[in-house]
Image (cartoon, rainbow, N blue to C red):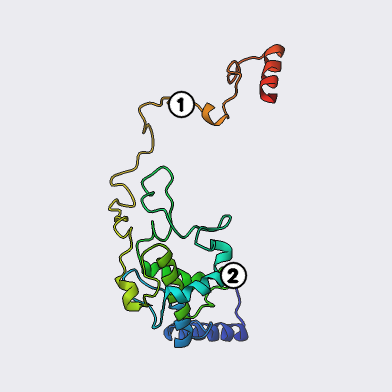
Amino acid sequence: MLVWTDRALLSMLTLIVSVAAIVDAGRYGLGTPATSEQIAGWDIDVRADGQGLPPGQGTAEEGEAIYAEQCASCHGVFGEGHGRHPVLIGGQGTLTSDGPMKTIGSYWPYASTVFDYVRRTMPFGHAQSLSDDQSYALTAFMLHINEILEYDQVLDAKALAAIQMPNRNGFVKDERPDVPAGEPCMSNCRSGVSVIGTARAVDVTPENEAKTAGAPMSDSADGAGDAARSK
């Protein structure tokens, strides 16, 4: 049988009252409310329609020097890319080919996304070290080398939101539901299975076809298989 002492009962009642008071206040006594300045530091995303773009401006001419100093070591002097770093130019007309090249000029549907990505994540290893004017200038330069913006054209929030990217109509809304309608099939879902090809094209099918699963092997057959695998 559980026996409560007066002290234990008093402690339990105090704890219940304290928890109830915290819940009633809508808080749990952890952390501090975020200030408007702290929120503003994170609330920097830019929408496709340009909403969220900050004040500022820049030209491709100004951005070229910033690019040479901060970006060219990874993306190449002309945006051609170095090593495994992304290529920034070219690729128009390749998206429906066997070798699509996804770049700012060929793939990205909104110019505001270029600005948003540059300001939030670049330069690599020093994210958010660029001013808004520098971000506009860099965006202008990358649009210029993709033949979308003139070299001396001033890029600001209004001008950026008005740019029509070459692939702006290349994305469509997926109308399919996340989950197919009706009850899912749990058994006997396929009427039959047929082999339509082998793995020889990628050299992973064993050369010795005499080795079938469960079939007994002679020493000579096993030796031939070893020789084939060795070869």
Q: Quadrant of the C terminus?
A: top right
Q: Which amino acid is tagged 2?
A: Gly
Q: Position of residue 59 (x, y in %)?
A: 42, 76
Q: Position of 97 compared to 87: left or right?
A: left
Q: Is residue 147 above or below residue 6?
A: above
Q: Position of 26 compared to 124: left or right?
A: left
Q: Secondary structure at mark 1?
A: loop
* Nearer to the camera, 129 or 5: 129
Q: Is residue 200 above or below residue 1?
A: above
Residue drawn 30% across the image and 53% down it? 174
Label 1: how many residues lie within 10 Å, few (<14), some (14-19) or many (20+)? few
Residue drawn 39% across the image and 75% down it? 152
Residue drawn 57% across the image and 86% down it? 10
Q: Which amino acid is tagged 1?
A: Gly
Q: Position of residue 128 (x, y in %)?
A: 52, 76
Residue identifier under label 1: 197
Q: Position of residue 86 (x, y in %)?
A: 51, 58
Residue identifier under label 2: 125
* Nearer to the camera, 161 or 215: 161
Q: Secondary structure at mark 2?
A: loop
Residue 50 in sight: no
